[in-house]
Image: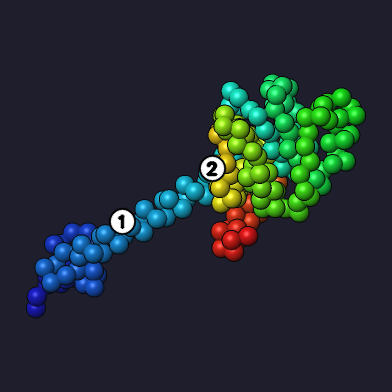
């Protein structure tokens, strides 16, 4: 009677052998299987990095430019207006462009002496962010070309809003109508996306806004609206 143990196909006597289905006719792992495994690992790694950094990806803010001619304010959280007023104070020649639906808010700010009403220009009333981007685009398309420098423009909104605004503004080709274009974040009343941490989904406020912004961004991309 043969007392030697029988080893699985492909084994050399130690450790655990690969199942025969993983091995080619030469007894080695097929290169296509190795490549597929590496691709899957790479994709999962990229997805993990994107998920962990989702809030920071949304917060696509630029540095304040040296010259500002127009400050475009997106309606929403009140710190956006405060940031726009701060920028207007640093750039006395800048004109503040606002959603027509925010007229009462800006009249109140003017009465309180926080902004010179002569420097505020109301555009048409916009119902959402995409409408606002189109309104700003129409304004700059209608500017007369004086033959001098094209205007330097800043878009002001909350940090979580800026990635979507960048997409919408580029889709409207605003960059071709102005000289310089920057996106500047205002502080949020509830959270700081830049310091949300790697476990951002544990913060209810951050989780809600991050998921909402990515859904809205996907909607713009898929529907063209």
Q: Residue 30's spot in the image, x, y percent?
A: 20, 65
| Quarter of the image with the C terminus in it | bottom right
* Residue lying at 77% horizontally and 37% vertically, measured from the top left: 121
Residue 38 badge: 1
Q: Is residue 142 left or right of residue 104?
A: left
- Quadrant of residue 109 in the image? top right
Q: In this view, does 186 lie to the left or right of 33?
A: right
Q: Can residue 204 be seen in this view?
A: no
Helix, strand or loop at label 1? It is helix
Residue 48 vs 117, above or below: the answer is below
Q: Residue 122's spot in the image, x, y percent?
A: 79, 41
Disc 2 vs disc 1: which is toward the camera? 2
Residue 43 vs 80, above or below: the answer is below
> Which of 94/194 is in front?
94
Q: N-terminal of the two: label 2 or label 1?
A: 1
Residue 207 badge: none
> Which of 157/41 is in front?
157
10 Å crowding of disc 2: few (<14), some (14-19), many (20+): some
Residue 176 badge: 2
10 Å crowding of disc 1: few (<14), some (14-19), many (20+): few
Q: Residue 202's spot in the image, x, y percent?
A: 64, 47
The CA span between labels 2 and 1 is 42 Å
> Which of 181/114 is in front?
181
* Residue lying at 36% horizontally and 59% vertically, measured from the top left: 40
Q: Residue 64's spot in the image, x, y percent?
A: 60, 27
| Quarter of the image with the N terminus in it | bottom left
Q: How many marks?
A: 2
């Amino acid at each position: 009677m043969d007392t030697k143990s029988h080893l699985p196909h492909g084994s050399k006597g130690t450790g655990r052998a690969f199942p025969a289905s993983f091995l080619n006719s030469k007894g080695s792992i097929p290169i296509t299987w190795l490549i597929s495994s590496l691709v899957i690992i790479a994709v999962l790694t990229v997805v993990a990095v994107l998920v962990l950094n989702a809030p920071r990806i949304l917060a696509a803010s630029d540095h304040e430019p040296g010259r500002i001619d127009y400050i475009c304010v997106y309606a929403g959280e009140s710190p956006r207006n405060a940031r726009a007023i701060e920028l207007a104070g640093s750039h006395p020649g800048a004109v503040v462009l606002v959603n027509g639906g925010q007229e009462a808010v800006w009249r109140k700010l003017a009465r309180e002496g926080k902004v010179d009403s002569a420097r505020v220009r109301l555009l048409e009333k916009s119902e959402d962010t995409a409408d606002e981007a189109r309104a700003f685009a129409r304004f700059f398309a209608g500017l007369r070309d004086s033959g001098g420098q094209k205007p330097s423009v800043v878009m002001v909104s909350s940090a979580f809003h800026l990635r979507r605004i960048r997409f919408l503004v580029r889709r409207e080709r605003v960059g071709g109508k102005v000289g310089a274009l920057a996106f500047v974040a205002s502080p949020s009343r509830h959270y700081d996306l830049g310091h949300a941490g790697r476990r951002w989904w544990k913060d209810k406020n951050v989780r809600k806004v991050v998921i909402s912004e990515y859904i809205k961004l996907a909607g713009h991309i898929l529907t063209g609206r």
